[in-house]
């Protein structure tokens, strides 16, 4: 059932007079949601010491946010189309603030994981609302492209500066401050947004297909769970069953959507080559970047011994190049075309990962700084271009769905990257540490993770300590080389697919 173009249905000043202020409000909320995907990367040493966090719990703390958020975005995007995008945005940001308090007051690793789940639910309500509201507020194609470029810059910058901000506040105020800093921003943004933002909804949307919503959530979470545990290298029969169920549920969801008059997600959108390529590029680029930033932050702290704030500041090259490239992308798309921008961005990511893989051991920070700069450059170009394609290739009444696809793939990519590539890194690290002259619990703990190796080293004499630390640094570098080769292959492959599927003359000038 085709829906008419969404129009403001209540409240808010005239869009034309304050649309850029509205963009600032939406981007402020997006910044917090994006930062929370990576802000704890540099806090792991503090968390390990304070909450006695094991390797499995470490991965859950980091990636459960992206996995849950990604699982919910299709549903929340559809809910926003029906109940109103402003209402969903404000409700989600209030929940995000409450969840921040829950996480900040955690007394155990699993309580913190529960807080991260609540944060993900709130973030899932916020994220599709921001992009779909931008699509509705900015009706001029050139202004919309610029607004989306700013949106993408903020989204990417949030994920990139998360470790920087996290490093500063964690070092001086403790890991809980990474969550407390959300609260005042939430209060201010909700107050301003309630007055300023107009409400939009698709006027002819039917009732929500709750069975389809359950299928999408269960399917995505099951798929992510299965991939995570299979990647650990010791999957159980239950893990394989959950993975298989995830695939089956998503197939059932797709079939149900094809038969629906008003689907949660119009899967026919993926028949558009440009739309499909942009969705794939977002997912796989963020899979590689999410894991890369996570592992580099650990490398800076454990291998080079930097404090959280020092490690965060040394990741600044990524944030700077991402900001510049994101803002330059709208101009580049107009002059050289979307396909070229996507290919160059993904190519820059592949070169960065390949450079990290080929760097001689021990890896030095100047090499990593160049790699981080290439990450930011590629992220800014590829993700901004992909977001513009996704929302411009659909009619206005599908803006919520396009936003949900963009953000699902963005967040799910980060979560799957940490789960999949982080698990592969852990396996290589464990195998490389097998020859340590330790026994019993000390050997098991030292082989589990580099954090465990540092803990064990602290209990040994000088000679033993240096031997364990040297072995751990070597094992971490070896594992980083392996995951970097895999990441380079992934993004290079998706670059080829993007060139193949996106028409040469495709331009972001409006709905296609």
Image (spheres, rainbow, N blue to C red):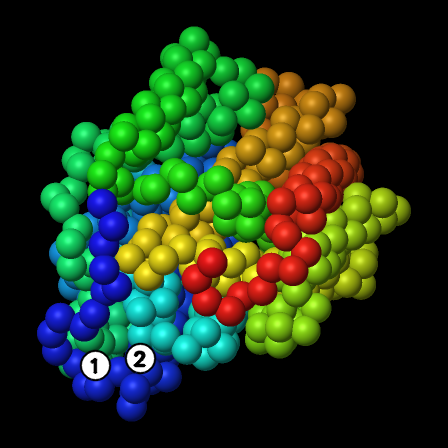
Residue at mark 2 to residue at mark 1: CA–CA distance = 7 Å
Q: Residue furthest bottom?
A: 17
Give x and y (percent) for residue 11. 12, 78
**Picture mark count:** 2
| Quarter residue 422 falls in | top right
Give x and y (percent) for residue 404. 36, 51
Determine contact: label 2, label 1, CB under 8 Å. Answer: yes
User: Taking the image as drawn, is residue 169 in sight?
Assistant: no
First of labels 2, 1 by sequence position: 2
- Secondary structure under tag 2 reads helix
Residue at the image position 30 percent from the left and 86 percent from the top: 16
Residue at the image position 32 percent from the left and 32 percent from the top: 258
Give x and y (percent) for residue 343. 70, 54
Q: Is residue 412 found left or right of 132 in the rendered image?
A: right
Q: Residue furthest top?
A: 237
Residue matched to label 2: 22
Residue matched to label 1: 196
């Amino acid at each position: 059932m085709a829906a008419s173009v969404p129009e403001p249905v209540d409240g808010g000043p005239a869009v034309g007079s304050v649309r850029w202020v509205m963009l600032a409000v939406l981007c402020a909320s997006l910044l917090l949601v994006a930062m929370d995907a990576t802000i704890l990367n540099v806090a792991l040493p503090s968390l390990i010491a304070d909450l006695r966090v094991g390797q499995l719990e470490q991965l859950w703390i980091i990636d459960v946010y992206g996995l849950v958020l990604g699982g919910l975005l299709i549903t929340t995007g559809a809910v926003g189309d029906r109940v109103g995008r402003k209402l969903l945005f404000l409700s989600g940001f209030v929940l995000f603030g409450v969840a921040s308090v829950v996480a900040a007051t955690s007394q155990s690793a699993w309580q913190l994981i529960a807080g991260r789940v609540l944060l993900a639910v709130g973030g899932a309500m916020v994220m599709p609302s921001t992009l779909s509201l931008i699509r509705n507020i900015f009706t001029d194609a050139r202004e919309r492209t610029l607004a989306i470029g700013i949106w993408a810059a903020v989204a990417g910058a949030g994920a990139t500066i998360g470790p920087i901000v996290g490093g500063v506040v964690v070092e001086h105020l403790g890991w809980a401050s990474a969550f407390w800093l959300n609260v005042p921003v939430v209060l201010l943004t909700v107050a301003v947004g309630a007055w300023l933002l107009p409400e939009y909804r698709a006027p002819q949307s039917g009732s929500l297909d709750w069975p389809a919503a359950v299928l999408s959530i269960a399917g995505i979470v099951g798929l992510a769970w299965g991939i995570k545990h299979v990647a650990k290298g010791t999957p159980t029969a239950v893990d394989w069953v959950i993975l298989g169920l995830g695939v089956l549920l998503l197939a059932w969801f797709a079939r149900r959507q094809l038969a629906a008059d008003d689907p949660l997600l119009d899967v026919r959108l993926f028949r558009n080559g440009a739309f499909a390529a942009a969705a794939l590029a977002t997912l796989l680029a963020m899979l590689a970047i999410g894991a890369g930033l996570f592992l580099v932050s650990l490398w800076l702290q454990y291998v080079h011994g930097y404090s959280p704030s020092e490690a965060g500041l040394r990741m600044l090259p990524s944030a700077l190049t991402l900001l510049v490239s994101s803002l330059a992308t709208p101009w580049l798309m107009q002059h050289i075309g979307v396909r070229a921008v996507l290919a160059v961005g993904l190519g820059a990511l592949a070169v960065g990962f390949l450079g990290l893989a080929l760097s001689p051991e021990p890896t030095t920070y100047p090499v990593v700084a160049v790699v981080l700069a290439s990450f930011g450059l590629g992220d800014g170009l590829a993700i901004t271009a992909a977001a513009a394609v996704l929302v411009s290739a659909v009619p206005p009444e599908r803006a919520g769905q396009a936003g949900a696809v963009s953000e699902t793939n963005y967040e799910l990519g980060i979560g799957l990257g940490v789960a999949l590539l982080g698990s592969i890194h852990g396996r290589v690290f464990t195998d490389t540490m097998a020859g340590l002259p330790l026994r019993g619990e000390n050997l098991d703990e030292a082989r589990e993770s580099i954090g465990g190796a540092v803990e064990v080293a602290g209990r040994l004499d000088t000679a033993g300590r240096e031997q364990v630390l040297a072995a751990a640094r070597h094992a971490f570098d070896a594992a980083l080389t392996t995951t970097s080769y895999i990441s380079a292959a992934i993004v290079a492959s998706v670059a080829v697919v993007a060139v193949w599927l996106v028409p040469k003359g495709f331009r972001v000038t409006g709905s296609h």
